[in-house]
Amino acid sequence: MNGFFDIPSDLQHSWLGLVGLHLREALLPVLAGLLISLPLAQLCVRFRWLYPPVLWITTVLYAIPSLAFFVLLIDYTGQTELTVMIPLTVYSLVVLVPSIVDGVRSVPQETLAAATAMGFGPVRRYVQVQLPIAVPAIIAGLRVATVSSISLVSVGTLIGNQGALGNLLNDANIYNRPELAVNAVLTMAALAIICDALLVVLRLLLTPWMPRRAHTKPKADRPDPAALALEDAAR
Amino acid sequence: MIRIDSVTKRYPDGTVAVDRLSLEIPDRSITVLVGPSGCGKTTTLRMINRMVEPSEGTILLDGKDILQQPVNTLRRSMGYVIQNAGLFQHRTIVDNIATVPRMLGWGKDKARARARELMERVGLDAALARRYPYQLSGGQQQRVGVARALAADPPVLLMDEPFSAVDPVVRKGLQDELLRIQEELGKTIVFVTHDIDEAVKIGTMVAVMRTGGKLAQFAPPAELLSDPADAFVEDFLGADRGIRRLSFFPSAGLDLLTTPIVAIDSTAEQIAARDTDDVPYLLVTDLDGRPLGWCEPRDLTAGAVEAEQLLPYGRPFVAGTDSLRAALDCAVLSPTGWAVAVDAEGRAAGVVSQQTIGEAIRGAHAEGRKTDKTDKTARVAR
Ligand SMILES: Nc1ncnc2c1ncn2[C@@H]1O[C@H](COP(=O)(O)OP(=O)(O)OP(=O)(O)O)[C@@H](O)[C@H]1O
Ligand SMILES: [Mg+2]
């Protein structure tokens, strides 16, 4: 009864059940973050003065420990998944907003002038020109947000086993079964790598218009998101 | 007709980019705005399609204030071409070109068919249709930019330094192409450049602007070269405006000598008959009459001419079609000092000396002073 995939009954889920739960708790916040960031970023592009304060606020929010968020939220949302997902949504903004803003701003002046001159209104121009050209930057942001979200879900274990795979870490302690901790870390890493790969595929599908080099050098200044995930697992 | 009526543009920071500019831009011809950097050319152009709103004055399109129609309708009736083309990098070439027709509600197939037709018109290989902009050279991208602006067949075309980012050879090709397209389509084109040579080459009318957004002179290119309004325009035209002006005089009136032309298979008598005192050299042609080179009569033995012995003849000019400038250039480049004229098929049509060309130039100038005032739009190929 002490197998690698035997999950203690207090978690009320099979291993696969935990994986599903984990993905939901990690990915819904990223999606919500994206939906908030898109209009927010557009406002920041349109009103340049807005960008620095928005950036500052998202950074400050990111600096708030998740525990503090839980204490604040638990009166309203209780010991639920929502209490975990709200802070994760807020954290995702710190990468998503700048990546969308940078992406939209990277659209060349000439392209914008050409669009305006052809009679594109502001909305059409945003949807048909700026957003598609920003896709590579947006997906780069999504990759970081997704991977870090997958590792951060585990902190939910602090509020009544809402940490999905992260709960295994706690149980490893209680039942003295270290293999559960190994299972948790490896599974989360695998999820992070798979989600990251899917996003890369999505980007390739969405951007047939990008120059493809035979050998893409990994950028030294941007750490590999999968590696970040493993580091963050302890957070 | 586009009428710019005493228009001033003051930017919010106080810069006066255009200062009480008035221009009448004639229909179906190319009007060039030229001037030093920062003199307000782009601002003027963008006021025509309302990308910039004038601070004072009005702009009339066919007698109607451009403020009276919805801005996007106005813009869709005016093609716009800019430096570096400004193509949509995320769309294929056909879809780039089909943009405005699609916005006007055309079906996808119809718009794409139209786009392919335009690719042909601007000299783009149909195989490029499904490519993306990054897969094209700068010159090809610029052609796509022109095709895209023409897609919905707008009566007006606004072009802002469209050819200044490509190398001189490609630029010349694009200019010739534009003139050819214009011949076929007869658009009202407003063309911005800071290159006076380009302005003189393609403009029917040229507006020279000076820093501060003031109009210095508005005239056909030939008049600009012969009668610059002031020292600024003269300076802007550059040192060799006398030579450049020759571009506007046809070579048709030149007296071509045909006597000193001999075919390579000529007999001794034929050669002797052609050797006159008028010309110190004989021009040897091949059996089809195409020039091979010059030769001194005494070196020419019938039946034994080797092409290597001949003196090069430089670059021939096309009799009648080319300008006096081209003829003079040929004479200057020819080692013998004589220019070779050819017909459209490249066969030798005659030879002419620098001296004769010089006389023709003096004659043309005298003639030019008389007719410049009356026939302002006369142009010859150059
Ligand atoms: N948005 C703006 N705000 C303030 N000043 C501007 C703005 N756009 C242009 N200007 C100023 O107006 C003047 C004319 O600019 P414009 O772009 O029309 O010049 P141009 O003739 O097209 O120059 P170039 O050949 O360098 O393109 C310049 O002094 C420029 O600095
Ligand atoms: Mg300009």
Image: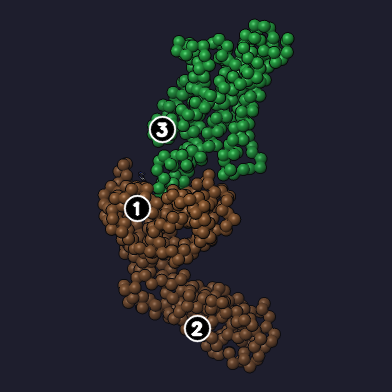
- Across and down, in percent, residue B284 comes to 61, 82
Badge 2: chain ID: B
Circle 1 packing at 10 Å, graded few (<14), some (14-19), many (20+), is many
Determine whether the residue tagged by mark 3 lies in a helix, strand or loop.
helix
User: Which chain appears green?
Assistant: A
Q: Nearer the viewer, residue B157 or A31?
A: A31
Circle 2 packing at 10 Å, graded few (<14), some (14-19), many (20+), is some
Three-letter amino acid code of the residue under disc 3: Leu
Question: How far separated are the C-alphas under marks 1 and 2?
Answer: 49 Å
> Looking at the rendering, in which quadrant would you find the C terminus of chain A?
top right
Circle 3 packing at 10 Å, graded few (<14), some (14-19), many (20+), is some
Three-letter amino acid code of the residue under disc 1: Ile
The residue beneath circle 3 is A43
Q: Which mark is residue B256?
A: 2
Asked if residue A62 can be seen in this view, the reply is no
Residue depicted at x 60% and y 86%: B262
Badge 3: chain ID: A
User: Chain B appears what colour?
Assistant: brown
Relative vertical location of residue A4 with respect to residue A209 in this rendering, above or below: above
Relative vertical location of residue A64 with respect to residue B344 in this rendering, above or below: above
Q: Are marks 3 and 1 in contact (CB under 8 Å)?
A: no
Q: Nearer the viewer, residue B302 or B380?
A: B380
Q: Are marks 1 and 2 in contact (CB under 8 Å)?
A: no
Determine whether the residue tagged by mark 1 lies in a helix, strand or loop.
helix
The residue beneath circle 1 is B48
Residue depicted at x 60% and y 76%: B312
Badge 1: chain ID: B
- Across and down, in percent, residue B222 comes to 38, 69
Three-letter amino acid code of the residue under disc 2: Leu
Q: Quadrant of residue B378?
A: bottom left
Question: How far separated are the C-alphas under marks 3 and 1?
Answer: 29 Å
Callout 3: CB less than 8 Å from ligand 1: no
